Image (tube, rainbow, N blue to C red):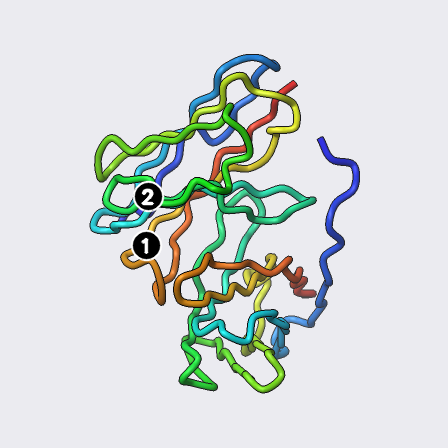
Amino acid sequence: DAGVIQSPRHEVTEMGQEVTLRCKPISGHDYLFWYRQTMMRGLELLIYFNNNVPIDDSGMPEDRFSAKMPNASFSTLKIQPSEPRDSAVYFCASSRERYNSPLHFGNGTRLTVT
Amino acid sequence: GESVGLHLPTLSVQEGDNSIINCAYSNSASDYFIWYKQESGKGPQFIIDIRSNMDKRQGQRVTVLLNKTVKHLSLQIAATQPGDSAVYFCAENEYGNKLVFGAGTILRVKS
């Protein structure tokens, strides 16, 4: 099993630019999660999907953030326009079930907005 | 970027010794718990989980203990190796709610 695959691994962009992060979940996992990790706040859940449908986006910080899951094997997290305070590591994770099932994380995208 | 961050507790152990990493959770209704290991530059890696109807579960070189009375979770690593050096997170889940991660503990293994 290839695990959760994220791209790019690193992204450096200027304030105001659009950023798109990509994720391929583990095949057969019906749930996909986007997290953000910072030193200040630790791991924060941004949004999660079930069978490609967004279920809870209450963690998305602002309207500048959007996420899509056009099919079971691909999801994107977009930030437009990006700001320096968006700098963080963004993780995608997937799981078989919503509860009582471990999340499996990708290796993240380190985003730096200058 | 941030100039002030969380100061994570650090556990330093000698290679070959056993490690015990502790976690106090907050929600008495949590019924599922997970331990993750995060190495530098990588995502959290699942180690072991336990449901609230158990108080102990063993894996390969790892044991998780759950004490619901005092809301305490621990991860024991036997014969700690340099490759065990990482940040370890506990996570708790109440059915119907979000998975909540702890702040983490840094494990440093001295050779």
Q: Chain of mark 2?
A: A
Q: Position of residue B89 (x, y in %)?
A: 57, 61
- Check disc 1 and report the residue beneath it: A95
Residue at figure coordinates x 54%, y 78% from the top left: B78
| SS category of the residue bearing label 1 | strand
Q: Residues within 10 Å of mark 1 (few under 14, many from 20)?
A: many
Q: Position of residue A112 (x, y in %)?
A: 60, 25
Determine the CA span between mark 1 and mark 2. 10 Å
Q: Examine the image and state in which quarter residue B23 appears.
A: bottom right
A65 shown above or below B24: above
A94 shown above or below A72: below
Q: Nearer the viewer, mark 1 or mark 2?
A: 2
* Amino acid tagged 1: Ser
Q: Position of residue A77 (x, y in %)?
A: 42, 30
Residues marked 1 and 2, same chain: yes
- Residue A49, label in figure: 2
| SS category of the residue bearing label 2 | strand
Residue at figure coordinates x 40%, y 62% from the top left: B96
Residue at figure coordinates x 65%, y 46% from the top left: A41
B55 shown above or below A79: below
Q: Chain of mark 1?
A: A
Q: Position of residue A64 (x, y in %)?
A: 51, 23
- The numbered mark, 1 or 2, whose residue comes first in the sequence reads 2
A13 shown above or below B18: above
* Amino acid tagged 2: Phe
